Image (cartoon, rainbow, N blue to C red):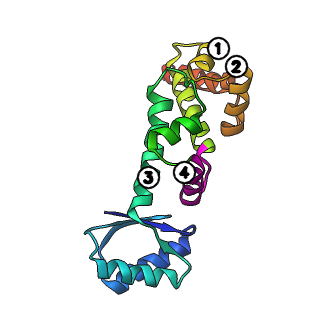
Amino acid sequence: MKLFIKNMVCIRCKMVVKESLSKLGIPFRTIELGEIDVEEILTPSQRELLKSDLVSYGLELMDDKKSVLIERIKNVIIEHVHYTEEPLIINFSTFLSQKLNYDYTYLANLFSEVQGITIEKFIITHKIERVKELLVYNELNLTEIAYQMHYSSVSHLSNQFKKITGLTPSHFKALKEKRRNMLENL
């Protein structure tokens, strides 16, 4: 069972959480920043003890409802970016709000609070990952990729790509080609 912790942002926080879990006798599999994978479902009393112990360190055990909503937001974005080729007729914020039946401002604030990045940045990151896949497949040119990924222009795509990766799409593609050529010479 996954538990989500607010304000858990460093290695020291992980040590504090590990110490709390051990002190309370709660077995766990892994501890990552913002997330614990416990071996068993917590009883209400274990949950309350953990919650109060974490608060004393400035950490907060988040409700499962919020973590489920965050996952739903991620899944809608990933599904749209990676598996849908149809362009949206409405703004993505409206689409997400309608799809999840929540006010977009609430979704955006919750997502930023939990994930540490905005929904927009999460979308852009996934779009660039998808563009990288399409460049590696080498089936579409940059203009076709920009169109398929719903960018207003190749220039807009190139600017975002460089901002995220530090490379232009052409340079990224050239590096892939160079690597493949080197492997063929082995």
Q: The residue under label 3 is which amino acid type?
A: Leu
Mark 3, residues whose alpha carbon is within 10 Å: few (<14), some, or many (≥20)? some
Dot 3 corresponds to which residue?
A: 69
Identify the mark nearer the N-term, 2 or 4: 4
Which residue occupies 58% across, 39% down?
93
Cα distance, mark 2 to mark 4?
A: 30 Å
Dot 4 corresponds to which residue?
A: 107
Give the x, y percent position of residue 151.
65, 23
Marks 4 & 3, CB-CB < 8 Å contact: yes
What secondary structure predominates along the stretch shown in magenta? helix
Between circles 4 and 1, the one closer to the viewer is 4
Query: Which secondary structure lies at badge 3?
Result: helix
Between circles 2 and 3, the one closer to the viewer is 3
Identify the mark nearer the N-term, 4 or 1: 4
Q: The residue under label 2 is which amino acid type?
A: Val
Dot 2 corresponds to which residue?
A: 154
Dot 1 corresponds to which residue?
A: 143
Cα distance, mark 2 to mark 3?
A: 34 Å
Cα distance, mark 4 to mark 1?
A: 33 Å
Give the x, y percent position of residue 171.
68, 25
In the picture, measured across the screen, residue 53 lies left or right of residue 130, that is left
- Between 147 and 186, the one lying in front of the other is 147
Cα distance, mark 4 to mark 3?
A: 8 Å
Give the x, y percent position of residue 84.
46, 25
Between circles 3 and 1, the one closer to the viewer is 3
Which residue occupies 67% across, 39% down?
164
Marks 2 & 1, CB-CB < 8 Å contact: yes
Q: Quadrant of residue 39?
A: bottom left
